[in-house]
Image: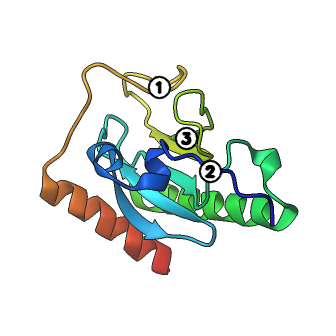
Amino acid sequence: MSKVIENSSCFYCEKGMELENLMIEAAKLQVSTLYVNKDQTHKGRCIVAFNRHVKELFQLDEKELHLFFEDVSKVAKLLNDVFRPGKLNYGIYGDLVSHLHMHLVPKYEKSSEWGEAFINSPTPKHFLSDMDYEEIVRMMQAGLQD
């Protein structure tokens, strides 16, 4: 296993209010956690975050890397099956939040960004009711059981 890198200011590691204000934990995966973004401008938008603090893919050992991409692939299939997007966009950024995580962004034909690069901070953002978030989380959890 790779060396653990500590970061006391990482909201993925702290699991406090900053994280809760942005996303909802939906499921524990093999080596990561699935979060539903509260901004649902792209229906089904979520994040797969590695369960320990590393900044870069190359900091994972071969097994961790394989399992992380299995987690991402499983969530991608789930998004495809549940939300039926025209395409999924994947993004690993990290210059603002330096914890290894991947954005999975369903894109839909005839939507405002179809055929363009994903904008991480669209204006305006699209927020849902608590019941709607609960339904998305339930659909994702059910899809992961299949």
Rendering colour mode: rainbow
What is the x, y in percent for residue 116?
53, 19
**In the image, is residue 140 above or below residue 99?**
below
Name the secondary structure under disc 1: loop
Pointer 2 and pointer 3: residues touching (CB < 8 Å)?
A: no
The residue lying toward the viewer, choosing from 93 and 12, is: 12
Residue 108 place in picture, x, y as percent: 43, 36
The residue under label 2 is which amino acid type?
Glu
- The numbered mark, 3 or 1, whose residue comes first in the sequence reads 3
Q: Compute the Cα span from label 1 to label 2.
A: 38 Å
Q: Residue furthest right?
A: 62
Classed neighbour count for the residue bearing mark 3: other residues with Cα under 10 Å, few (<14), some (14–19), many (≥20): some
Above or below, 93 relative to 82: above
Residue at the image point whose x is 54% and y is 54% from the top: 48
Residue 40 in sight from this viewpoint: yes
**Three-letter code, disc 3:** Lys
Q: Quadrant of residue 132?
A: bottom left
The structure residue drawn at horizontal position 21% and vertical position 39%, both measured from the top left corner, is 127
Q: Nearer the viewer, mark 1 or mark 2?
A: 2
Say which of marks 2 and 3 sits in front: 2
Could you say where residue 83 lies in the image, as x and y percent from the top left?
A: 40, 54
Of 49 and 122, which appears nearest the observer?
49
Discs 1, 2 touching: Cβ within 8 Å: no
Label for residue 87?
Answer: 3
Three-letter code, disc 1:
Trp
- Residue on which the image places disc 2: 6
Q: Is residue 117 left or right of residue 61?
A: left
Q: CA distance from mark 2 to mark 3?
A: 35 Å
Screen quadrant of the N terminus: bottom right
Q: Which mark is residue 122?
A: none
Residue position for label 1 = 114
